[in-house]
Amino acid sequence: MGRPKECSRPFQMLSMDLIGPLPVTRKQNTFIFVVTCCFSKYSLLFPIKRATSNILSHILEEKVFLVHGIPSTVLMDNSKQFTSSTFKNLLTKYEIPNIQYTPKYTPQVNTVERYNKTIIVAISSYIENDHRLWDTNIPKIQFALNSSVNEATGFTPSFLVFGRELVPCGSHYIDVDMTENIIFSPRDDYAENLGTLHKCFDKVQLALLKAHSRNSSYYNLRRKVNEFNIGDIVWKRTYYLSDKDSRFAKKLAPKFLKCRVVGKRSPLIYELQDFNNNKNLGIWHMKDLKRDGNVN
């Protein structure tokens, strides 16, 4: 794993990804657009009908940027929706200084990909036989994710973002007697409590650094350093999707594709070209690569 990315407050660094395609629901939704705050781990889930750059840009601007503020860093994979001119223009419009594209399927780099499996498991626990209902409980799943104490930070995402815990039930309130005149408690007390959040943020920063160090040690123990150079022949792991209409089953497809290294972004990230037809395959993480002759 590489160096940890530094952030010191909620929604300073965002990680985003798409889940899908999923079964078409009765509302015609087929994807989930997931945006996660890397600092607080607060997640936003948006069911969408089509995964187009226009739709993603609209959601990101109106429901994230103009609600939680503009981030300094955005992390996303190199899929066509995120690399399109429409999406890039949105990031340029708000002058976001750091835009980082990661290879696909790299949860050790892109935070949101670690939560995708959790989201899918949560969805499967709600639906039974009718998979067209997966989008009906997305708000509940989002609430549960943001109300649970995160193992890395030690806080709930909602507390770090709002300075308070989300109330799950009206029975939480003790004084429920309504009076004719509403009496407001002193706002200074609440503001003073919010002023102590910076201490929590310091704890979170330290906790995230420790978690990164711990995860790195586990990850590096299982990884053999295998740096490549431009011109090397490698085999890239394939990620096919089965397509019934095209009579294509991923289980029967080749597990690796022979490629040539044509670019080196870092010791971990490489740009590849198809060995047979010279088609550019984009950037890939070294975890998906094997040197020629080492494929089992």
Image (spheres, rainbow, N blue to C red):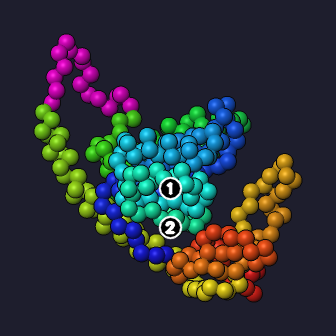
- Report if residue 243 is visible in the image: yes
Residue 164, x across and y down, in percent: 29, 43
As drawn, the residue found furthest toward the right would be: 247
Q: Relative to 199, does residue 21 appear above or below in the rendering?
A: above
**Quadrant the C terminus occupies:** bottom right
Residue 87, x across and y down, in percent: 52, 52
Which region shows up in magenta? 169-185
Asked whether the beta carbons under mark 2 and mark 1 sit within 8 Å of each other, the answer is no
Query: How far apart are labels 2 and 1 at the CA level?
Result: 20 Å
Classify mark 2: helix, strand or loop.
loop
Seen at 18% across and 46% down, the residue is: 193
Amino acid carrying mark 2 in the image = Val
Amino acid carrying mark 1 in the image = Lys
Q: Is residue 247 left or right of residue 112?
A: right
Confirm whether the magenta stretch covers residue 149: no
According to the image, label 2 marks what residue? 109
Classify mark 1: helix, strand or loop.
helix
In-front residue for pair 276/114: 276
In-front residue for pair 246/260: 260
Q: Relative to 190, does residue 231 appear above or below in the rendering?
A: below
- Report if residue 155 is visible in the image: no
According to the image, label 1 marks what residue? 88
The rendered magenta stretch, by its main secondary structure, is classed as: loop
Q: Relative to 148, does residue 215 appear above or below in the rendering?
A: below
Q: Earlier in the sequence, mark 2 or mark 1?
A: 1
Seen at 46% across and 76% down, the residue is: 2
